[in-house]
Amino acid sequence: MDIIEIFGTKIYNITLEETLDKIREFINGESLKVIFTPNTEIVMAAKDDNVLRDIINQGDLIVPDGIGLIYASRIKKKPLKERVTGYDISMNMLNMADENSYSLYLLGGKEGIAQIAKDKIEEKYKHIKVAGYHHGYFKGSHNGYTDHDEENKIIDEINSKNPDIIFLGLGFPKQEIWIDANKSRLKGKVIIGNGGVIDVLSGNTKRAPEIFLKLNLEWFYRLIKEPSRIRRQMALPKFMFKVIFSKNVIK
């Protein structure tokens, strides 16, 4: 499969449909596979953090979640096929799970959010088995408490359920760090770090209106709703500036 590197971070040149085909292969496999969904902000953070970059690059599937990555690849004449978002992957995985009666574990969000998401998933998707859920506010590898009892209990519960799919919503970079620290002792077929998807499934967070999504302005909508995100959103113009005026940033 074609892979490019943007500031050293691997990105698979893949469509959503090709991504779903790979996920079907993963679910029919024997070991846990990891999906990461880097956007512009994540690539910029990984550019200056070798440990984080190595974590992402070890993923089994690394898709271009940010529109800035698509624009950058085109500017440098190494075009990515399309933007593949963690949200779209996750929604399609739910459809896949419903069609095949796969099991799902939800880990993330504030207390009570994952349970609400579970209820809404089971209401909409009649053949998905939500094997378990837990909020994201626990002590573990992602926040400096490696091998903590709280983390170990969650891993024991996941392993007792042996789910086909794990949705992990701890936000960047906590979810990437947690996956890297624990993937070797987790049972399951696919784990995806999908940020706020559990919040969206619960109804606690609303996704951008369709017009913003079609215009690739979801980031702008989120900025309007959360002005405090301005510092994070500055990663996009910084990223594009470096892409335009630097050499060998995409290989």
Image (spheres, helix red, strand yellow):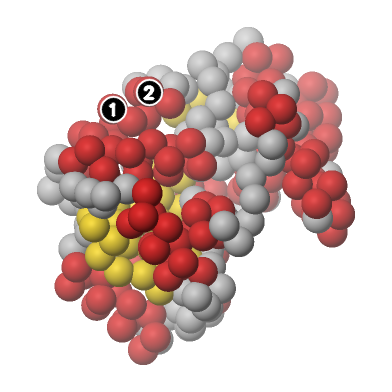
Instruction: Choose top left, top right, bottom left or bottom right for residue 78.
Output: top right
Asked if residue 138 is positioned above or below residue 92 in the image, the reply reads: below
In the rendered image, the quadrant that contains the C terminus is top right
* Amino acid, disc 2: Glu
Which residue occupies 51% across, 60% down? 202
Which disc, if any, is residue 21?
1
| Dot 1 and dot 2 residues touching (CB under 8 Å) | yes
Q: Secondary structure at mark 2?
A: helix
Residue drawn at the location 79% of the way across and 22% of the way down: 244
The residue lying toward the viewer, choosing from 188 and 77, is 188
Instruction: Give the vertical position of 26 relative to 159 (above or below).
Output: above
The answer to whether 52 is drawn above or below residue 116 in the figure is above
* Residue nearest the observer in this picture, 29 or 24: 24
Dot 1 crowding, Cα within 10 Å, few <14, some 14–19, many 20+: few
View extreme (front): residue:
123
Q: Position of residue 159 (x, y in %)?
A: 21, 70
| Residue under the image location 39 percent in, 63 percent down | 119
Q: Badge 2 local density, few (<14 within 10 Å), some, or many (20+)?
A: few
Residue located at (64% from left, 50% from top): 206
- Residue 150, image quadrant: bottom left
Q: How many marks?
A: 2
The disc placed on residue 17 is 2
Disc marking residue 66: none
